[in-house]
Image (cartoon, rainbow, N blue to C red):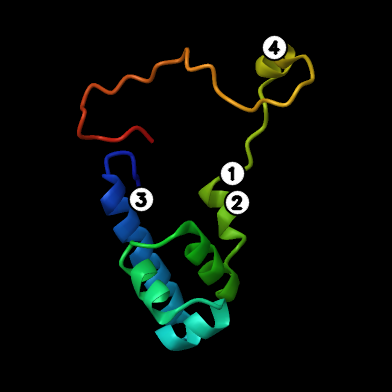
Amino acid sequence: MEFSSFTPHAIATELGERIKLARLNADLTQKELAVKAGISIKAVTNSEKGKSTLESIIAILVALEMTEQLNSFIPKQEVSPVQLAKLQGKERKRATGTHKATNKNKDVPLW
């Protein structure tokens, strides 16, 4: 599925549906998942609606034994050789803000 044309709300809703399907595939009730994840039933319900905290989503992924999915979700980023040379061995802590992203359609988020 290509998310580039989705709104943040639509992406969150889709992720919530995927969490719900993963729970159902694991044959767990919302209450059972909440207990296993160490979060409230309301947190599970909110996650399935796409309205959750990152910490709750991670707890659910741990409980569903799906943490390997995080590598596909947000791959580990490496510092580019150009940036490394500019930093001269120091750790990068903030962006310079000199690169401006363009968004011709203001209703479509940049992803």
Numbered mark located on residue 1 in the image:
3
Task: Indicate left or right for 60 with 107 as reference.
Answer: right
Per the image, the residue denoted by label 4 is: 86
Q: Residues within 10 Å of mark 3 (few under 14, many from 20)?
A: few
Q: Are marks 1 and 2 in contact (CB under 8 Å)?
A: yes
Q: Residue at x 62, y 60 (%)?
A: 68
- Per the image, label 3 sits on a secondary structure element best described as loop
Residue situated furthest right in the rendering:
89
Per the image, the residue denoted by label 1 is: 75
Marks 1, 3: nearer the viewer: 1
The residue under label 4 is which amino acid type? Lys
Q: CA distance from mark 2 to mark 3?
A: 17 Å
What percent of the width, then of the height, locates residue 95?
55, 22
What percent of the width, then of the height, locates residue 84?
72, 18
Q: Residues within 10 Å of mark 4 (few under 14, many from 20)?
A: few
- Per the image, label 2 sits on a secondary structure element best described as helix
- Mark 2 or mark 3: which comes first in sequence? 3
Q: Are marks 2 and 4 in contact (CB under 8 Å)?
A: no
Q: CA distance from mark 4 to mark 1?
A: 23 Å
Task: Indicate left or right for 51 with 107 as reference.
Answer: right
22 or 97: which is nearer to us?
97
Q: Residue at x 66, y 22 (%)?
A: 80
- Mark 1 or mark 3: which comes first in sequence? 3
- Mark 4 or mark 1: which comes first in sequence? 1
Q: Quadrant of residue 21?
A: bottom left
- Per the image, label 4 sits on a secondary structure element best described as helix
Does residue 19 appear in the picture of this structure?
yes
Q: Are marks 1 and 3 in contact (CB under 8 Å)?
A: no
Task: Indicate left or right for 78 with 17 as reference.
Answer: right
Per the image, the residue denoted by label 2 is: 71
